[in-house]
Amino acid sequence: MRKQAKTDRFAPFLSKYSNLMVTNKIIKFSIFCISIICIYQQYSINKYFDNQIVIIQPPNLKGEASVGRSFADDEYLKAMSSYVGLMFLNVGAGNARYQFSEILKLVLPSQYSVMKKKLKAKADLLERYSSISYAAFIVKNKAMIIEKDKVTFFASRKKIIGSDISQPVIYKVVIDYKIINGTFFIVDIKEVENA
């Protein structure tokens, strides 16, 4: 009798049909919980990516700069622009291809073929006239102008032919850029003489 009473108390839990219903409800509840957690994680990850700030030190930056997913502070833009601009302007037959290949690493993929043709033509010209080289430096008394997706600065460049050094000429250098996922990409580089 005592054994029968124990079995009767556990009878609802021992039924195959009832256990199957409970198992299905537990599985459905687990799937619902996992779905909610996945949705929350996806929302959180996107929120963190948008607010993420990375500290980067470009080659010629003396301090620190902040770069986010789609923005960069002025110090970073000045450092990257002067770095790229001086690599573009300080060239000779011996270093043109190397420096231009370094610039191509920073070019936006959709603009890569256009910039490659432009830089290759400039390198070919320098190699054809191998006694010509250029030395440039940024003009400090003219401010670097930072706009959305464009940095403009002025550089003084001397043309060196053998042992003759010409008078410096002021160039206006315009670098079109984009910040995509925290990476500085060059869209175009323009130089205007006697600016």
Image (cartoon, rainbow, N blue to C red):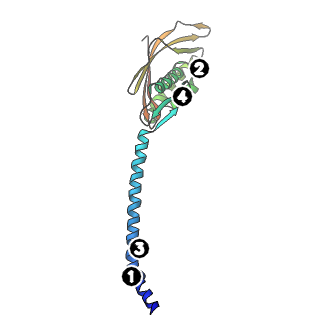
| Dot 1 and dot 3 residues touching (CB under 8 Å) | no
The residue singled out by tag 4 in the image is 58
Tell me the residue at 49%/35% (across/down).
54
Q: Which mark is residue 12?
A: 1
| The N terminus lies in quadrant | bottom left
Q: Residue 93: which numbered mark, if any?
A: 2
Q: Residue at x 41, y 84 (%)?
A: 9
Pointer 1 or 3: first along the chain: 1
CA separation in Å, label 1 and label 3: 14 Å
Question: How far apart are the two marked residues, 1 and 4, measured between alpha carbons?
Answer: 71 Å
Residue that label 3 marks = 23
Neighbor class of circle 4 (other Cα within 10 Å; few <14, some 14-19, many 20+) is some
Q: Is the C-beta separation of discs 2 and 3 under 8 Å?
A: no
Please state which amino acid type lies under the numbered disc 1: Pro
How many residues crowd around disc 1 within 10 Å: few (fewer than 14), some, or many (20 or more)?
few
x and y percentages locating residue 107 in the rendered image: 47, 31
- Residue 176, x across and y down, in percent: 42, 26
Distance from label 2 to label 4 (Cα)?
Answer: 26 Å
At x 39% / y 82%, what residue is drawn? 12
Q: Nearer the viewer, mark 3 or mark 4?
A: 3
Does residue 163 sit above or below 112 in this rendering?
above
Name the residue: 44% across, 28% down.
73
Image position of 97 (left or right of 178): right
